[in-house]
Every structure is written in C-alpha cells, then in structure tokens.
Image (cartoon, coloured by chain):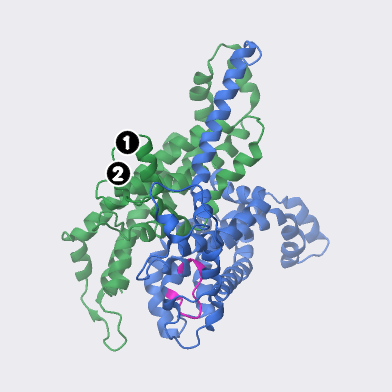
Chain colours: A blue, B green
Amino acid sequence: MGVFGEPRSARIRRRILFYGALTLLLVVFVFPFFWMAFNSFKTNEKILEYPPVFIFEPTLQNFKNVLWQTPVVYSSGAQGGPSASSFFVQFTFNSAVVAFGSLGIGMVLALPAAYGIARYRRRMLALGILICRMIPGISFLVPLFIVFRVFGLLDTYSGLIIVHLIITVPLITWIMIGFFEEVPVELEEAARIDGCSRAGVFLRIALPLVRPGLVSAAILALIFTWNSFLFPLILAGARTKTLPVMVYSFMTFDYLDLGGIYAASTLITLPVIIMVLLVQRQFIRGLTIGGVKG
Amino acid sequence: MSLFRWSGAASTPPVWIGAGNYADVFSGDPGFRNALFVMAYFTVASVLIEVTLGVGLAQLLNREFVGKGIARTLLILPIAGTPVALALVWRHMYNPSNGVFTWFAEILHLPPQRWLADVTTVIPSLILFDVWQWTPLIMLITLAGLVSLPADLYEAAQIDGASPWQAFWRITLPLVRPTIVAAAMLRFMDSVKTFDQIYVTTQGGPGIASQTLNLYVFDQAFQYLHFGYASALLVVLFFVILAGNAVLVSLRRGEA
C-alpha cells in the first residue's frame, strides 16, 4: 500500500522491520530441529549441563550407539526377533515395508474410489471418507486389536499394512477427488467414442492426467505412515516394530539415554525432511487442497 | 463390544451387561469428565490460537520478497517431522532443571516455570507445542486462498482511500473466510485425534492433568484391560466429535 508515495527512509525502515520479523519467526519454527540435531552430537553429560552449552567437542558416539549397539530391552528374547547386530536397520526396514506396502495397496483401493466419487458426483460418499478422517486412531485400535489377535495378525507385516490403510485410503481418496474433478469430461467422452472402455478411460486418460496429484498424495501417505506411532505401538511386536516405536523405547529404559534419544530422533526425521525438501511443491499442494476445496 | 464386560482374555468370554458401561460413563466417572474437559480445553485453545496466528502469518508472507521459497520450506518442517521424535525433543526442552526453555525463561527474567511437570502449566505447554507444529498448516492453506484474490479489488480500495488495515478487514477477511473456516475444521478434526504428542511428553500426567479422552481410552483398554468400557467410551467419543464438527459446519453455512 502506498509504497510508491513513501519516502525512501520509511521504505527501508519497513523492510528492516519485515525481515526482522521474518527472521524471528523462522528461528522460532526451526529451533527445535536445530536443537535436536545439535544435541545429538553431545555426550550425555554435556546434554544435561545447565545452562545449556553451545561450544563443545562434537561426538558421533550417540549415532554409533543407535546404529550398532543393542540396548538391553530389544533382546527381550522374543522368538524370531532380528539378529542382535542390526536392530536399527531392521526397524528401518520394517518402517519402509509398512509405509510402501500401505501406500501401494492404498493407491489400488483409493484411486478408483476417488475417480468414481469425482465422476459420478457422489458427495455423500466423500462425506463418508471425511468422517473416516475424523475418527481418532484409538477408535480403530481397540476393536482391531481384538480382531487381529483372533486372526493371528499381531506382529505381522500384513497386519500393520492393513491397519495403516486407515490412514492412507481416506487421505489419498480425499486428495485425488479434487484432481480427478479437474480432468475435462470432454476428453473422456472422446475416448469413449473411439471405443475405449470405462476402465480404459480411467487407466489411459484420467490417471496420466492426474500424475501431479498422485505425487502429492503418495508423499503425504508415505510421511504419515512413516510417522505413525499409535498403531505399531500396540499392534507391532519384536519382529515388526517400526522406527517411531523404537525411538520411544529409548525413553522407557531404566536410565535415560538422552544422547540416544536425540540421535535416534535425528535419524528418523532426516528421511522425512529430505523428502519434503525434494518435493515441497507437491507436499504443500497436497496439504492445502483439502482446505481450499473442502 | 460396548455392551459387555471383558478383560480381553481369551479364556474368559465377555459378559453381557447391557447398557451398564454407558451408565458408568454418564453416572459421573470422574476420569471421563476430566478427560472431556482436558480435550475441550486443549482443542479449542490450540485451534483458536493457530487460526489467528496462521492468518496473520499468511498476511505477512503474502508478498514478494527475497528468500520466500526458503521461508516456506522451513515453515513446513514442523508439519512433516515425526511427532514422536519432535515430542521427545520438546519434552527435554521443557525439562524444569536442564531444559533449554527453562534457560530461555531465566534469560528473559520470567518467573521459573515447571512446564509439563505442573498441573496448571501442562496444558498451556502442550498447546504451545501444538501451535508450533500446526500453525504453518493454517498459514499455508490461507496463503493458497490469498493468492487467488483479485488484485484490482485492492487497487480500487486504495483509490477510494482505504487504509491497509481497512482493506484487510473489509476485503481480505470476507473473501478468504470460507478457506479459513475449512482450515479450522481440518485442524479441529486432527486436534481431537492428538495422541502421540501428549502420550510421549506427559502420558496424560502429571496425575491426569493432561489426559484427553484418547489417552483415557488407551489406558482403559491397554493398561487396565477394560475392553468393554473402552468401547463404550469410544462410541461416546465418536458422537462428541461428530457434534463438534456439526457445529463447525453449521457455523460455516451461516457465514457463507
């Protein structure tokens, strides 16, 4: 407003004020991440020092401990548990299997659903999807725990993948409805006239056109499954424990290994941050589409 | 399930007790009432603060400036970060004897805080954590709404002599209101689901001072193995959430 009419000094003052506020804002939002990474290079004694120390000799010991050492609680003697040397690798693998598994199956289930809702204007079904998003995870957990025990799905990959469909299917459907609605109907009608089947239209016309949306939905689904804690906390066991549960178990030891907590937190957050940095445009698109359209 | 009493043991079958569990819920189970209150306090306060701050920040960032891309990238990190890892970090930052926040409070000459360890400050501390994590989401959604506003409206307003403040209240806010309400709803839905952050930082404590319904049900089911009672609580929780959303939807209809 009125930038052109302002004297130069006032404009400079405004600019300094703006960048000052911006810097302060960013510092506030980034500080916990900085602190997480920063402390993971300190020894336990340094982390506990008060007032906090900012100059110290960095050490990689925490990371070594997390990656290669085996804390006592892991080897709880469960049958079929991973070999002692590779717990972190094993848990990372578990997390990846669950994340990609529920992403893949979620896509297969959710894409046709989203397409159907968008094409045939079934807003009531969309509302149903939204209600699924509203229900807290714990509501699914109690009945599922009982069912899983009956069917022997506790502590299995299939069980964990099934339960995470609760996260991925509504999420993908919700995002993709918006993208499918933008595909011009004329294009599909033309293909139909040329002899394409309904499934063919979906696979060859609609899907390629919504590829940017697919990326958004996939990223969000991956991140939310990777971050998921409550489901694996109860439904995973020694064999299939995922990273968030492992990080948490650092806290329930007899003694508190803060260095381990910080290092493990850093390691588990790193892939997510890298992913977000690589595809932030799609990430933001996926996050905001529900709000703007909903 | 909610009509039975069952410890979850395979050897002892569930016992039919009709509406007994529901009677327990409503006949003044203090744990339930406390959990309901904590959840309402946490949700309403954090969503209100997040919406206010988020809209303000969106307004601040809705301009061209050097480093806009970097600023946006940094602001989405709290949304994407693993809640358990962040909660562990925040938990230690709040530590009354050696946490970095305690140190900040000392530098700023604030009275010493016990953060998560005190019944009166535990929920505000959790709200601060939630606000830190989720304000950027509201900001991003609002920003997406702001970008689509027509620029000529503002030029016209400026010619008519409107101040920036007036332009914000009279033009911007009415136009992006649907977006803001949608963002608030989204946030409300997720806020009542909050579990990881509270479970990891306080486990509902000290005492039951930060025990939301989610944590209460979790304890009932997996600590005390009251599966029937937990199921009844879940049915009640579902209707509470549905009612909350219905209120928000009607707000939105009324304002649109």
- The subunit carrying tag 1 is B
- The percent position of residue B124, horizontal first and vertical second, equals 33, 45
- The percent position of residue A180, horizontal first and vertical second, equals 66, 54
- The subunit carrying tag 2 is B
Residue found at the very far left of the displayed protein? B27
Nearer the observer, A43 or B248 = A43
**Compared to A149, does B93 lie above or below?**
above
Question: Residue A240 vs residue A251: left or right?
Answer: right
Amino acid type assigned to the residue bearing label 1 in the image: Leu
Q: State yes or no: discs 1 and 2 in contact (Cβ < 8 Å).
A: yes
Residue found at the very far front of the displayed protein? A57
Q: Which residues are magenta?
A: A235-245
Question: Residue B234 vs residue A202: left or right?
Answer: left
Nearer the observer, B95 or B12 = B95
- Tell me if residue B139 is in the magenta stretch: no
Question: Residue A263 vs residue A215: left or right?
Answer: left
- The percent position of residue B77, horizontal first and vertical second, equals 56, 49
- Tell me if residue A240 is in the magenta stretch: yes
Sort mark 1 into few (<14), some (14-19) or many (20+) by Cα contacts within 10 Å: few
Locate the N terminus of chain B and report the quarter of the image it occupies.
bottom left
**Compared to B143, does B2 lie above or below?**
below
Q: Is residue A241 visible?
A: yes
Q: Is residue A121 visible?
A: no
Name the mark on residue B113.
Answer: 2
Amino acid type assigned to the residue bearing label 2 in the image: Gln
**Compared to A153, does B50 lie above or below?**
above
Question: Residue B63 vs residue B163: left or right?
Answer: right
Nearer the observer, A286 or A241 = A241
Name the mark on residue B110.
Answer: 1
**At 29% from the left edge and 72% from the top edge, which residue is drawn?**
B223
